[in-house]
Image (cartoon, helix red, strand yellow):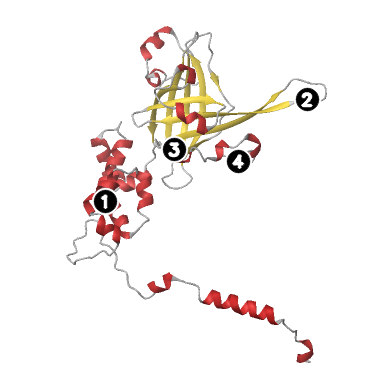
């Protein structure tokens, strides 16, 4: 019975299977040479161990520790986090508090060095790196983008009686450590708009600058639209992150436009936030420009780093982004 149920396998099939198995067994696997080899870890920063340590990595023979420190000192904090994943020596070298102290003082420069030192001692156990990761901060190494869409009724034609148009526009915000920010509304993609998001932009670019304050995770910002009837735009935002320390989302809590009188326009200057700091939501000082609390166009802002501007999904056409919902 067993002989009757057995299947005959062609000789060429069995030979090819045997060859493939032999090739798989003879495949080069250089990581097998690391099995059983004990790798001695690099001593952590500040270690008091007096045992000599010899690093066999070629890059560390060619690049002394002093030059390596200078290279790390010129990297942005997010690049430091990536570099710490290279090897143990880089990981422990990057834990040097000097790197993170300079990053924190630059990010929260409006608080001053003494106040930041008190905050890190009182709330973050004296660790500048922990303060950088856990303390809410507005990122300045990119741009925040809010994508908004709405449907507009079109003009009836001969064949189409009820046409509609899907309109897509973006809100762009770029923050600076000094407490200033740039704001722009446009239908252009992020890779096109990034060229004019600077203080040298002309009036034709319609880039407006204003002031902001950050208290915990709440952001208060204000800008002024010049014209015959000057209008101030007040924004209240909430900062959050998809992961710890990311700070890559801004939820719009309120968006209010209201009018200004001549005295406020002359005294405000760039510090428009100080003028409207104590205003109510429905307060306006120009009867021709009533206060309007906008309920549409409040999609959350998504952070796009400068190095990802060209490849961001926000550059896709509307028909390819219908299912993309930032949040």
Going from N to C along the chain, the mark reached first, 4 or 3, is 3
Marks 2 and 1 close (CB-CB < 8 Å): no
Query: Which residue occupies 61% across, 79% down?
Result: 18
Residue under label 1: 68
Q: Nearer the viewer, mark 3 or mark 2?
A: 3
- List x then y, in percent, for residue 40: 29, 68
Going from N to C along the chain, the mark reached first, 3 or 1, is 1
Report which residue position mark 4 lands on.
324
Disc 4: CA contacts within 10 A as few (<14), some (14-19) or many (>=20): few
- Please tell me whether mark 2 sits on a helix, a strand or a loop: loop
Q: Residues within 10 Å of mark 2 (few under 14, many from 20)?
A: few
Assess whether mark 3 and mark 4 are in contact (beta carbons under 8 angstroms). no
Is residue 327 visible to the viewer in this orientation of the structure?
no
Q: Quadrant of the C terminus?
A: top right
Tell me, for residue 306, which label it has, or none: 3
Quarter of the image with the N terminus is bottom right
Gap between marks 3 and 1 measured at Cα: 25 Å
Dots 4, 2 in contact, CB < 8 A? no
> CA–CA distance between discs 4 and 3?
21 Å
- In-front residue for pair 209/6: 6
Percent position of residue 159, x then y? 82, 25
Whether residue 254 is visible, yes or no, is yes
Q: Is residue 151 left or right of residue 109?
A: right
């Amino acid at each position: 019975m067993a002989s009757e149920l057995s299947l005959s396998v062609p000789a060429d099939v069995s030979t090819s299977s045997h060859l493939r198995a032999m090739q798989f067994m003879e495949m080069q696997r250089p990581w097998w040479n690391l099995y059983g080899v004990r790798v001695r870890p690099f001593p952590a920063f500040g270690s008091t161990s007096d045992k000599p340590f010899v690093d066999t990595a070629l890059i560390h023979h060619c690049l002394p520790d002093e030059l390596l420190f200078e290279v790390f000192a010129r990297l942005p904090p997010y690049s430091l986090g990536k570099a710490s994943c290279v090897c143990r020596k880089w990981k422990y070298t990057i834990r040097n508090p000097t790197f993170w102290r300079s990053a924190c003082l630059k990010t929260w420069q409006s608080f001053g060095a003494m106040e930041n030192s008190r905050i890190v001692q009182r709330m973050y156990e004296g660790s500048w790196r922990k303060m950088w990761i856990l303390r809410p901060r507005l990122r300045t190494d990119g741009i925040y983008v809010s994508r908004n869409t709405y449907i507009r009724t079109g003009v009836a034609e001969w064949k189409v009686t009820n046409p509609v148009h899907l309109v897509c526009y973006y809100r762009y915000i770029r923050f600076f450590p000094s407490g200033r920010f740039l704001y722009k509304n446009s239908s252009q993609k992020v890779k096109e708009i990034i060229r004019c998001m600077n203080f040298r932009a002309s009036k034709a670019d319609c880039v407006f600058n204003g002031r902001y304050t950050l208290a915990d995770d709440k952001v208060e910002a204000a800008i002024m639209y010049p014209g015959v009837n000057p209008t101030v735009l007040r924004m209240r935002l909430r900062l959050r992150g998809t992961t710890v320390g990311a700070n890559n989302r801004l939820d719009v809590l309120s968006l209010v436009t209201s009018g200004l009188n001549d005295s406020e326009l002359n005294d405000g200057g760039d510090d428009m936030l100080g003028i409207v700091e104590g205003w109510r939501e429905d307060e306006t000082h120009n009867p021709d420009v009533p206060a309007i609390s906008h309920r549409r166009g409040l999609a959350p802002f998504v952070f796009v780093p400068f190095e990802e501007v060209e490849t961001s999904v926000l550059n896709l056409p509307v028909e390819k982004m219908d299912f993309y919902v930032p949040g």
